[in-house]
Image (cartoon, rainbow, N blue to C red):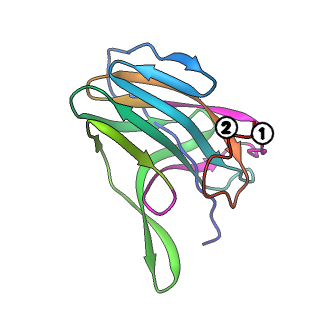
Amino acid sequence: MRNSFALAFAGLLSTAALAQETDEHVFTAGALTIEHPWVRAAQAGADTLAFAEFINTGPADTLLSVAAPVAAAAEIVGLTLEGGVIGTVAVGPVEIPTGAFSFDPGGLGLMLHGVAEALAVGTEIELTLSFAIAGEVTIHVLVEPANAMAHSHAH
């Protein structure tokens, strides 16, 4: 598939939960910890995917939406493989269960449609995730190579 993928979240809740950066690229909101969010590099105008790891120490929460100032639109997607071609399908809200949960290549991702500017490796973008319980959380997301399959931890 020619499109790169990225992450963006649109805030739906009127009450915002404050995200606190506890360590480099580890964010907390309520019972949720969001670790090592990353996005694939992309050319201006392209689509790209973002990923992250979640630790939920409370009851199940629901990721309602995603927004990114750098993208024309953003959505939660599932990755598909049909006839050897990788694609995506919008999946809407996703439950984040108690325990560990990941958005990663081969599973779920955060699609950024039509990034306004090139996303260069080593830079960061902001994404806002909207949760049913934790509220809105703005996180800093590292840009990894376009072919990355995981966060490199080398920044």
The disc label shown at residue 24, or none: none
Furthest toward the left, the residue is 59
**Mark pair 2, 1: CA separation:** 6 Å
Residue 149 rendering spot, x and y as whole percentages: 61, 58
Residue 129 rendering spot, x and y as whole percentages: 43, 31
Furthest toward the bottom, the residue is 83
Residue at (71% x, 53% y) in the render: 42
Residue 15 rendering spot, x and y as whole percentages: 32, 14
Q: Is residue 12 left or right of residue 116?
A: left
Q: Amino acid at mark 2?
A: Leu
Q: Amino acid at mark 1?
A: Gly
- Give yes or no for residue 129 being in the magenta stretch: no
- List the residue tagged with mark 2: 142
- What is the crowding at mark 1: few (fewer than 14 residues within 10 Å), some, or many (at least 20)? few
Q: Is residue 122 above or below residue 29?
A: below
Choose between 113 and 102: the one closer to the eye. Answer: 102
* Mark 2 residue element: strand
Q: Is residue 131 above or below residue 14?
A: below
User: Sequence-wise, which precedes: disc 2 or disc 1?
Assistant: 1
- List the residue tagged with mark 1: 122
How many marks do you count on the picture?
2
Residue at (47% x, 40% y) in the render: 53
Image marks 2 and 1: residues in contact by CB distance under 8 Å: yes
- Give yes or no for residue 108 being in the magenta stretch: yes
Which residues fall within the magenta stretch?
105-128
